[in-house]
Amino acid sequence: MPESSHRRLRLIPRGQDVQQSVLELFYGPLAPVYPLLTRMLFGNAWQAWQRNALPWLAGARVVAEIGCGPGDFATDLAAQGKRVLAIDRSPTMIRLARRRVARFQRVWIVRADAQRLPLRDACLDAVVTTFPTEVFLTYEMTSEVARVLRPGGLYVAVVAAQPRSWPWWIRPFRRLLGPVANHPPLDCRRLPAPPPVPLFAEMRWETQQDATGRVCLWIARRGD
């Protein structure tokens, strides 16, 4: 969720202020090169990790993506015939996303704050976010997501990922990347989780693993 005023989860460990400042630039003035950055660091794995959310959204017809960034995952959703609200608070990312999804008629780009969604109650089948900032952990965002979901609707967050291996051109620089490249095995159960809210009947971690690495998803379901 590209919101420059919040820190990213897991991609930059806590205390790494220099790396964090650099990352925030890529959600502001350097946003146009953000897709190139993720491709350079993770190859095709970044989009593969995002797509771990797709099976959970199979039955949803109307989906909001919070923190749509440059619009890559919104295009995946639209290609499956879903109606998509692509939401971000970064004006630069909104411009990138608008160009990215231009060929789809059922994608709407919305600039908004995740803690104050401009949507009516119970209007969505699902909400998804991938690699969110720490606003993901706030009661305000969690309760807003629950509010806009229909009864039985799903909230799916791809929160963190650990590569099985790094692209060959990155391996010589792993020492420079420090903890980002050398963190211990990812345990989803140890990640911070959003607070419980009354409207969610179920909230849990799911771990998925494939050829690209291990992915942690946070799944919540609104009660009936």
Image (cartoon, rainbow, N blue to C red):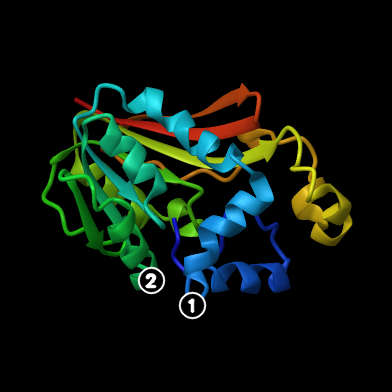
Mark 1 residue type: Pro
The answer to which of 6 and 215 lies nearer the viewer is 215
Q: What residue would you read off at disc 1?
A: 29
Q: Are marks 1 and 2 in contact (CB under 8 Å)?
A: yes
Q: Is residue 10 visible in this depiction of the protein?
A: no
Q: Give the quadrant of residue 178.
A: bottom right
Label whose residue precedes the other's in the sequence (1 or 2):
1
| Place of residue 142 in the rendered image (x, y in percent of width and height, measured from the top left) | 35, 48
**In this rendering, would 34 be left or right of 199?**
right
Badge 2 marks a residue whose secondary structure is helix
As drawn, 24 above or below 180: below
**In this rendering, would 137 be left or right of 146?**
right
Q: Locate the N terminus by quadrant.
A: bottom left
Q: Give the quadrant of residue 81.
A: top left
Q: Residues within 10 Å of mark 2 (few under 14, many from 20)?
A: some
Q: What residue would you read off at disc 2?
A: 92
The answer to which of 195 and 100 lies nearer the viewer is 100
| Place of residue 52 in the rendered image (x, y in percent of width and height, measured from the top left) | 48, 29
Q: Residue at x 32, y 46 (%)?
A: 65
Q: Residues within 10 Å of mark 1 (few under 14, many from 20)?
A: few
Q: Residue at x 48, y 38 (%)?
A: 50
